[in-house]
Image (cartoon, coloured by chain):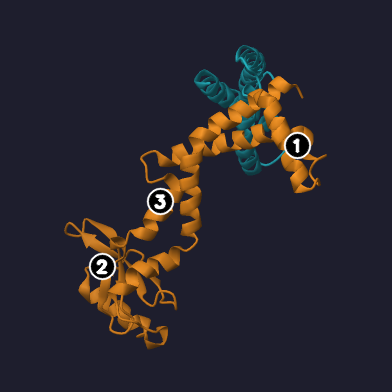
Chain colours: A orange, B cyan
Amino acid sequence: MKASTIRSALEGHGWIGLFISIPLFIVFWAGSLTLFYPELKAWSVLPHTEFRSVSDSLPLSEIVDTALSEHDVDMQERMFVVLPTETLPLYELYLPVKQNGATHTELTSLYVDPTNGKTVAPIDSFHLADFLYGLHIDLNLPMGDHIVGIITLFFTVVIFTGLIVQFKKLITHFFFPIEVQKLHSAISLQTCTM
Amino acid sequence: MWRKTLLSFFIGLVLSVSITLNINHFLPIDVDIKLLAGYILGFLLWAGLIAYFFCFETIKKPVLQCLCVLIISLVLNVLIKIGVVG
């Protein structure tokens, strides 16, 4: 491969990297934290409740009956229940509550104490875990999914230009001791930038 | 560099879509697999074309080469669309 090609590819590699590195870092960082989504959710919710054990739970039928008596739920629509776990020992109820004189319903999500059936708080009032997840998916920006898509495209370009720069040495130098590799790359980088 | 980036972005987009449409037309596979394969191939082709632009010091040569391929590919697209090529 010609030296000018490698030099141009290296220049492009750095140029694109300059723009995508910061948003890409945010996406990766938020993604690594999103691995702990249930724990983050529990971390923000549990201080609002007393410590509970899953074994103290009331039967699901009583929990649902209490919730239905407190809210004007449209029984024709679907509702969802997430059972308590060791990580988050609260019931999660998703209820289609009637709005505007029953012209339409809105899915209301609630954390419910498993020992007495009382509502702890709406699920929507805890933002941290969802904020980090949003940061990972679309940087919480308008048109964010498009922006992240374009950043992904340019990240692929950075990989391709990186492969072009290293192409000649990719296989032959793959098993070189690391010190020799460092020496070689320092020399070749110098040659490129001269 | 801005000019190279923007030109490669848009020419790469049109050319990758056009080539992927042509390849997909001739592949003897189910439409659902075609959609997935086209999606992945189009994206990689787009990135590859941008990387190709960045392998040249000036943009004249890659632009001319890509426009030539684009014209041929677009003609094939039209021929397939009007049913001349089966």
Residue B46 appears at what percent x and percent y?
Answer: 60, 30
Q: Are marks 1 and 2 on the same chain?
A: yes
Crowd class of label 2 (few under 14; some 14 to 19; many from 20; radius 10 Å):
many
Q: Which residue lies furthest to the left in this view?
A: A101
Which mark sits nearer the N-terminus, 1 or 2?
2
Which residue in the structure is indicated by mark 1? Answer: A184
Q: Is residue B51 visible?
A: no
Looking at the picture, tell me which residue is in the foreground, A31 or A63: A31
Which residue is at a point 45% across and 50% down the rendered structure image? Answer: A136
Residue B69 appears at what percent x and percent y?
Answer: 67, 17
A8 with respect to A29 (left or right): right
Q: Is residue A89 visible?
A: yes
Q: In which quarter of the image is the C terminus of chain A?
A: top right
Badge number at residue A134:
3
Give the secondary structure at mark 3: helix
A101 with respect to A86 (left or right): left
Q: Quadrant of residue A176?
A: top right
From the viewer's perspective, is the residue at label 2 or at label 3 nearer?
A: 3
Badge number at residue A86:
none
Looking at the picture, tell me which residue is in the foreground, B55 or A70: B55
| Amino acid on which disc 2 is placed | Val
Rendered position, A58 above or below A120: below
Q: Quadrant of the N terminus of chain A?
A: top right
Give the secondary structure at mark 2: loop
Tell me how far mark 1 sits from mark 3, CA to CA: 42 Å
Which residue in the structure is indicated by mark 2? Answer: A73
Q: Which residue lies furthest to the bottom in this view?
A: A56
Looking at the picture, tell me which residue is in the foreground, A131 or A166: A166
Are the residues at dot 1 and dot 3 in contact (C-beta closer than 8 Å)? no
Q: Quadrant of residue A157?
A: top right
Which residue is at a point 22% across and 70% down the rendered structure image? Answer: A71
Rendered position, A186 above or below B53: below
